[in-house]
Each structure stands twice: as C-alpha cells, then as structure tokens.
Amino acid sequence: MNTLERMVVKFPAYRDFEAARIAANDAMMALLIGARLGEHELTTSAASPETRLPTLFGQIESIQRVNRTVGDAARLLARAEAHLAGMAIPYALAVHGAFVALTVEMMRGDGLDAHSTGWDTPKAR
C-alpha cells in the first residue's frame, strides 16, 4: 500500500473515537491559543497594568466576575499552559480509554477474548 493512501476503516466505534480524539485535540489547542492570544493582547495593550478587566472589556458577557487587573490576568495566562496540559492529558487518556474499553467489550462479545474475573471494562456506552 502506498504510504500516502488512506485506509477506509469500516468500524463505527473507531470512527467515533477518531472524531472524539480530534474534537478533544481541537478544544485543547483552542484553549492554548486563546491563552496565548489573551496574554499577547493584554501585555501589548495601551491600558495600564492596573486597569481592571471589566473596565477594558466591558462588552464581554460576565467579565465583571473576573475582578482582575490587566497585569494580573496577563501573568495568569502566561502560566496557563502547564495547567492546560494538566487538564488535557487526563482528557485525552479518557477518550482513548473509552475506545479501548469498547474494543475489549466487542472482542469479548465475539468470543475473541475470554472474560476475566481479574479485570472488567467499564461500560463505554
């Protein structure tokens, strides 16, 4: 098979897994990019670092709940990547784990893997 050819997988659970994996990746990247864009916007803003975010971005819904200064918010966003990774890694593992559990259940249903009393898969459905 040519390495550039795509293989069609006729396995709905795998297609669902791929869609969930892509959606999770897109969401994680959006959060990372948003944090970087926000930090850039705040650090290059003409506003004083002591300006409160609701004063600067009053048109954003619920911004008054974030009673932070521009400088404080920029520092938080600069350190956000490690926290995002801390949330993203378990999320990615959960997406993969759900697929693995579903695959094992399918194999057991087809008699290809003997049910073990030592380990049960969580219900992925």
Image (tube, helix red, strand yellow):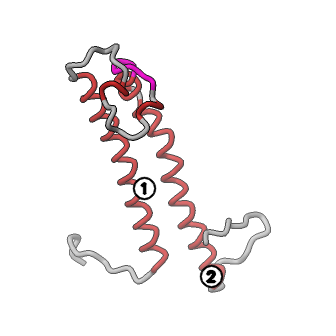
What is the x, y in percent for residue 46?
A: 20, 19
In the displayed structure, would residue 69 be above or below residue 84? above
Taking the view exactly as shown, the residue that stands out farthest to the bottom is 110
What is the x, y in percent for residue 83?
A: 47, 34
- For the record, the magenta segment spans 67-72
Q: Nearer the viewer, mark 1 or mark 2?
A: 1
Residue at position x 35%, y 38% from top? 60
Residue at position x 53%, y 67% from top? 99
Amino acid at dot 2 = Leu
What is the x, y in percent for residue 111?
A: 66, 85
Q: Mark 1 to mark 2: distance in Å?
A: 30 Å
What kind of element bears circle 1?
helix
* 121 left or right, relative to 61: right
Residue at position x 65%, y 79% from top? 108
Label 2 Cα neighbours within 10 Å, binned few <14 / some 14-19 / many ≥20? few
Amino acid at dot 1 = Ala
Quarter residue 2 falls in: bottom left
Residue under label 1? 24
* 73 left or right, relative to 91: left
In the displayed structure, would residue 97 be above or below residue 16? above
What is the x, y in percent for residue 105?
A: 63, 75
Q: Which mark is residue 112?
A: 2
Q: The C terminus appears in which quarter of the rendering?
A: bottom right
**Does 68 lie within the magenta span?**
yes
Quarter residue 74 falls in: top left
Q: Camera-side residue: 62 or 77?
A: 62
